[in-house]
Image (spheres, rainbow, N blue to C red):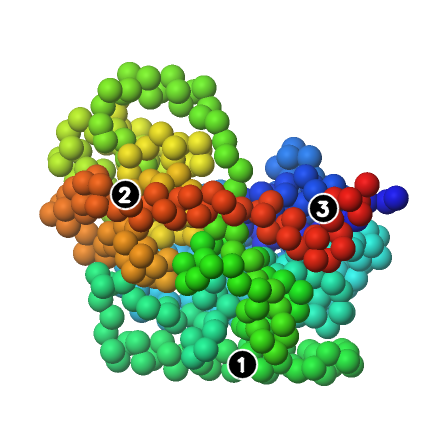
Amino acid sequence: MNRHKVILISPPFSSQLTPTLALAEAFREEGLHTIIACGESFKEKIQRDGFGFVPLLVNRNSNTGIAQQTKLPEEERRRLHSFLESTKKGAVATLLLQSRDRREDMFADPESLFHDVERINRNESPDLWVANQLSYAVTLVLYCLDYPFITFCPPHPLTIPKGKKIYGVPGAWPSSIPVDKRELDTLIATATEVEKSFTEEFNQIIRKRGTSRRIVANAFRLTSQKAVFFNYPDFKEGPRTKYNAEEDTREFYLGSCFEEEPLPPAYEKRLAPCRDKKPKILLVLGTFLSYREDVLNTCIASTKKRFPNSVVIVGAGASAEVLRKMELEDVLVEEYVPQKALIPHMDVIMHHGGNNTFTESLYYGKPMIIMPFSSDQFDVASDAEKYSLAPVLDPNSLNYERLASALQLALSGAYEGTLSHWSKHVRSRGPRYAVRKLLYTENMSTEKCQ
């Protein structure tokens, strides 16, 4: 019997492709023929991992690992620079700019995407598609064409807003992040207008296509009617089966979505002279926010001042060249570091609240210090604070005293109990857990694929 086939669509961003590859591996292990549709710049990596590849560009911008070094059209480069500069103005200013840019970021050329997806469907005849929630045009296309698909949500679950939540406005704010009420009111009004205009454009396309699909009430809440996979722990309660009562959509909390990696020999050799030094700190701000060399610089200097015997490993992106002046035997600055391989060997992970880093750190039960800048990072940081998983700092008011205090707290064992509890929870889930449950209910289980 022919194997079932699944096509996973990924935006052309390293941070989105990483969990997509882990999810693809789970489908492959269950006997499905697995293909990833993504931008050409990721073709080699996808094929090197043994997956089928089809070219599909769902965004005008991309990020192949270091945002500032990725080839981009001039307008996209300008918008990226504006975003990175906005992070210096604070949380609300950054989110406001992101809301205003949302149309260009997330809904580029849906008409061309219809033709591309239909062509791929004709050529590959997949049994199932997997749509990344941040690729809104992809969801719209699959919805209109009535192709069988599930939704994969790599960022925080509130990226799919529920209740009174407005997409682009955090559901909760960490206590350390200053929020001006007038600025927040402007953000809410802007995000509400973006939500309205997005939804209107969705419905215009639905009507124009002459599809039998009904118009939608909120474009940002449109997901698969089959299932939603969240790359996140289920903090609210135990296993649930319903996320949308009207659609009876099932939701699965994966806890984390990545593949464990061994430490490369070069890093083992580099760290060997520092074996007895403590604490070992991993400092990463993601592929975009490593732009903030001021924050990285403060973190390095403050850590070494408070803990002179510490080891600091820095994923510095485009800031690496500037920061290498601080490099010593026990301060390693690289453009890119093998984060997933390093985390198990670290004592504290300092990061920006990116969902990948958060869930990877939680998987290993590692103490963290979270410094959110943008997007869903404030929701991640709020959860970390609420569930006693990590201290949260404002990156724009970072100083020695605040960072030294947070480091002392993270290393004190204050979070050990909750980290251990949620580490066990996260390890009990993962992409295989969700894929097996989905395939069984969809009659696409391993036995069916033999």
Taking the spot 40% from the left edge, 52% from the top edge, the residue there is: 354
Q: Nearer the viewer, residue 373 or 256?
A: 256
Disc 3 is placed on an element classified as strand
Observer able to see residue 170: yes
Q: Residues within 10 Å of mark 2 (few under 14, many from 20)?
A: some
Locate residue 382, reporting x and y percent.
32, 61
Q: Is there a contact, CB below 8 Å, between mark 2 and mark 1?
A: no
Identified at 57% across, 64% down, the residue is 241
- Mark 2 or 1: in front is 2
Amino acid at circle 2: Glu
At label 3, counting other C-alpha atoms closer than 10 Å, the crowd grade (few under 14, some 14-19, many 20 or more) is many
- The earlier-in-sequence mark between 2 and 1 is 1
User: Where does residue 15 sit, x and y in percent of width and height?
Assistant: 50, 48
User: Earlier along the polypeptide chain: callout 3 or callout 2?
Assistant: 3
Check the image and report above or below for 65 versus 169: above
In which quadrant is the C terminus drawn?
top right
Residue, disc 3: 35
State the separation of the CA atoms marked 3 and 1: 33 Å
**SS for tag 1?**
helix
Q: Position of residue 159 (x, y in %)?
A: 48, 65
Among numbered discs 3 and 1, the one appearing first in the sequence: 3
- Does residue 203 lie above or below 33 as drawn? below
Horizontal side, residue 331 vs residue 132: left or right:
left
For the residue pair 327 and 232, the one nearer the viewer reads as 232
Q: Residue at x 46, y 82 (%)?
A: 193
- Residue on which disc 1 sits: 197
Q: Amino acid at mark 1?
A: Ser
Residue drawn where x is 22% and y is 41% of the image: 413
Kindly report the distance in space between the C-alpha atoms of the residues bearing marks 3 and 2: 40 Å
Residue that carries the numbered disc 2 in the rendered image: 416
Q: Name the secondary structure under disc 2.
A: helix
